[in-house]
Image: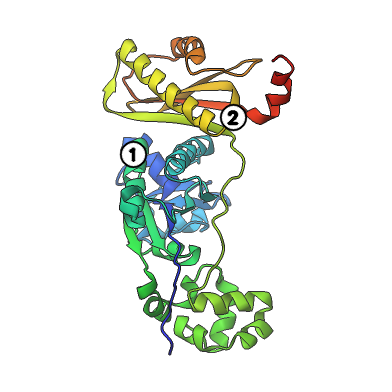
Amino acid sequence: MTAFINLNPRKIIHIDMDAFYASVEQRDFPELRGKPLVVGGDPSGRGVVAAASYEVRKFGVRSAMSCYEARKRCPEVIFVRPRFEVYRAVSSDIRQIMHSLTPHVEPLSLDEAYLDVTGLQVHKGSATLMANWLRAQILQHTGLNASAGVSFNKMLAKIASDINKPNGTAIITPADADAFISTLPIERFHGIGKATAKRLHAMGISDGADLRRTPAAVLVQEFGKRGQFYHDIAHGRDERAVKSERTHKSVGSETTFRDNLSDDDQLRVQIYEQNADAFTQLQKKQLLAYTITLKIKYADFTQITRSHTLSTAFDSAKSAHYWLDKLFLDIPRGLPIRLVGVTFSSLTPAAQLLPQLNLFE
């Protein structure tokens, strides 16, 4: 058998949050930590499990299972209703961390995304070091654990992210790919669902080695165009690009303090620093912004935002100070603050206004 060779490997990272919804609930409500927890519907009705904590998974409880079945398997399970607005806010924070590393980010859902870090020179150019940096940043900023998979294509990176869960990183290199794929059960291939796996088993195909030995023509005859895809992934080929978001909806900057702050003067200094960084990003991207948002995260991880929109674009970082001061005064105080952030939105490419500006030159 010919060994797998990849002459020009890409560097792809797949980040997958660990039991995301359940972990957010356990983070925000300490009394739920260490307990078997299900985020989902009514166990007395037709509710389904949206997320299961690791404590309840050992009883065989999984996402999409009925809540009734979850309670049968674990009578001590605690059910909580989902808070999707909170999960979306946390997901946005995580996405911002990813974009601070590379613009090539493809979200798959609120709790997972691909990143293409090919050619980046930060962290010694090591995708593994980048993945571990991302996991550390996510933990620092959100209090949540993530797992990462690193490989040279999307399929293998996604599979890798599941190997050392929870809270781990796994790498599949081009040198390792051939042996890894050969022993991989077909159910573990991303893109092969239960129905397809059943048909493949009926053809005598149970793992990657079996799939690789099956001629492409046979797979195409059985599965149509998908058959060629199955043939390719059996050989470690997945040329799908990371499809990053092409339009900027917002540009921002935020920082988490080593020690929580309560002093207003210190907080204003930090807010101005994030404002300056965000405005610099706007200039680099040649964008104009009409809306500014101040974000505050308290010591208990709750957060609040305040925004203001102008009729004309912000023309300098300093021009935003007045509105940031007003927004800051509108922020409820009481708890110490662990994070501040400034985001510009309602964006317009600066080039679109150049013809209007030229009229006044």
Q: Secondary structure at mark 1?
A: loop
The reply to whether residue 161 is in sight is no
In this rendering, the label closer to the viewer, 2 or 1:
2
Q: CA distance from mark 2 to mark 1?
A: 32 Å
> Which residue: 67% across, 75% down?
225
Residue in the picture at 43% in, 79% down: 4
Residue displayed at 41% across by 83% down = 3
Residue 131 image point, x, y percent: 36, 52
Which label belongs to residue 287?
Answer: 2
Quadrant the C terminus occupies: top right
Three-letter residue code for mark 2:
Leu
Q: Is residue 323 above or below residue 58?
A: above
The amino acid type of the residue labelled 1 equals Gly
- Give the percent coordinates (x, y) of residue 143: 34, 39
Residue 117, visible in the rendered structure: yes
Q: Quadrant of the N terminus?
A: bottom left
Residue 143 is tagged as 1
Q: Report the side of 49 relative to 148 (left or right).
A: right
Residue at (53% x, 35% y) in the render: 85
